[in-house]
Every structure is written in C-alpha cells, then in structure tokens.
Image (cartoon, rainbow, N blue to C red):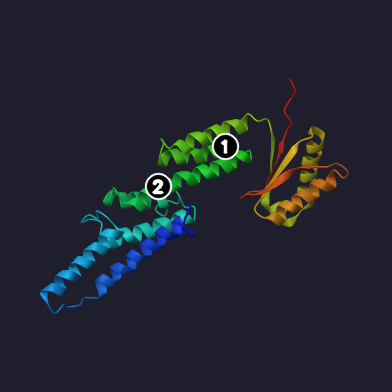
Amino acid sequence: MKSGGIPRLSLRLLTVVGCGVLLVACATETPEPETAAETEQAIQIRTLSEAEVIRGASANGSPRMIADLLFAALQALDADRLLTPMNDNAYDRFQRVLSFDPDNVIALEGLEDIVLRYVELAQDASRQGLFEEAETLLGRARYVNPAHPAIVEAGDLLQAEKDSGDLFFELNAGELAQRSEAIQQEIAAIAEQARENEAFFLITAPSDDVARWIFSVMREAVSGYRLRGNIELASRSGVRLRLPEAED
C-alpha cells in the first residue's frame, strides 16, 4: 500500500529514522535558556516531539531503544526475515517493542504485515503446486495471528489447488541457469504432455528472459502445435498444466 506515492514501509522507516535523529539531537544539544519562559518552552517542545513519535515508552524501554528496535524490525521485515533467523527477525523485535509499549502503532502494523507476507508466499506456493511449503507458510502466519481472516482465505485457495487435478513441474534453477541438455529434455517432455492433454500452460520464473526461454524450448518440442498459456514472474521456476474440465 502506498501513501502519497511513498510505500508504507518506507514511510515508517522514515518516521523511525526521524525519531533517532531527534533523540540524538536532544542528547547532544543542551542549550541553556536565558529566561524561565524560554526554559518552559524548550521543555514543552521536547515532550511533544517524543510523544508524536513513540507513545507510552516505559522506564525500561527508552524512546531511543524503541526507535532502534523499530528500525531494525522494519529492515528485517523488508528483507523477509520474518520469524527467522533467531534473534535477528522482525517478529521478535516488534514483540519486544510491544512489551515496552503495548499500543505502539508501528509494531502492531508490523505484525500484521508479517502475517500478510506469509499469506502472500503461501498463495504463490499453492499456485505452483508446492503444497507442503504452502502449509508450512500458513502455519507460520497462524503462529503470529491465528485468527487473521486472510489465513482462512489462503487455506481455501490451497485446498482448491490441491483439488484442481492440474499437473505441476518444478524446474531446477541451476540447470536453468546453465540451460543444460537435461533441463531442455525435461521441458520438452512437459510440452508433450501439454499437447497430449490439450492443457493450458502457466510458466513461472524469476525473470522474463528465463520464462521466455522455457517457452521457446516447449514450442520447439511440439513444433506445429499451438501451445496456449501464459507467463508470470515468481521467485521459482516451474510449469503448471491446467487440464481441461472433464465432460459429464
């Protein structure tokens, strides 16, 4: 989601960075007001600034500590370090912030984003026929928030993909990078099945170049037959054959 053209994650990072800069400034600049009125004004400005960035920091969790934790948590979230590795993941850091400040908006939104990211990854895995991986990812989402409605929807999608009867083929990334003879034979065999079953193909790959190469090998393998399908970018390479519905 974006706000004013800037991704929400970037906005939160900017907020936390701004907090850190503010706290450093408060720690290093110690002006001595010349009058009591100036002293009162300076205290009011400092208090309002901290409250705007971080609410409810306890004595055991200073605003600076919370700002550092939030910054590290958002970086981990952006790098997909969601629940792992141990002691260096987004979930642990957001939870630590909430132990100091239970109403911290950035930390609560961060936990929500972790769930949604796991759901997104599970949906991608389901569409590629990686059903065990999808189950694992949904299990991690439930660990963060077992009652989240998006998990139920992703579970329904997973079951529907299992029941589809489609054929799924995962392609080895190393073999694809080398464009080896073995991977070309494997892709050619997939094309033969597409022709025999009059199936609609879906090629997934990390780049358009790899996806188009897979298609070129398929097309050459069944020269003269018009393959029907589509290409999607995904983290892994594979081919899905959507079989036509059986007539009653």
Indicate whether 204 appears above or below 69.
above
Q: Quadrant of residue 147?
A: top left
SS type, badge 1: helix
Q: Amino acid at mark 1?
A: Glu
The structure residue drawn at horizontal position 63% and vertical position 29%, both measured from the top left corner, is 163
Mark carried by residue 149: none
Res. 92 visible in picture: yes
Pick out the residue farthest to the front: 4
Mark carried by residue 111: 2
N-term-proximal mark, 1 vs 2: 2
* Circle 1 or circle 2, nearest the eye: 2
Residue under numbered circle 1: 132
Indicate whether 201 appears above or below 234.
above
Q: Position of residue 159 (x, y in %)?
A: 57, 31
Indicate whether 53 appears above or below 228.
below
- The residue carrying pointer 1 sits among few (fewer than 14), some (14 to 19) or many (20 or more) residues within 10 Å by Cα, namely few
237 sits left or right of 144 in the view: right
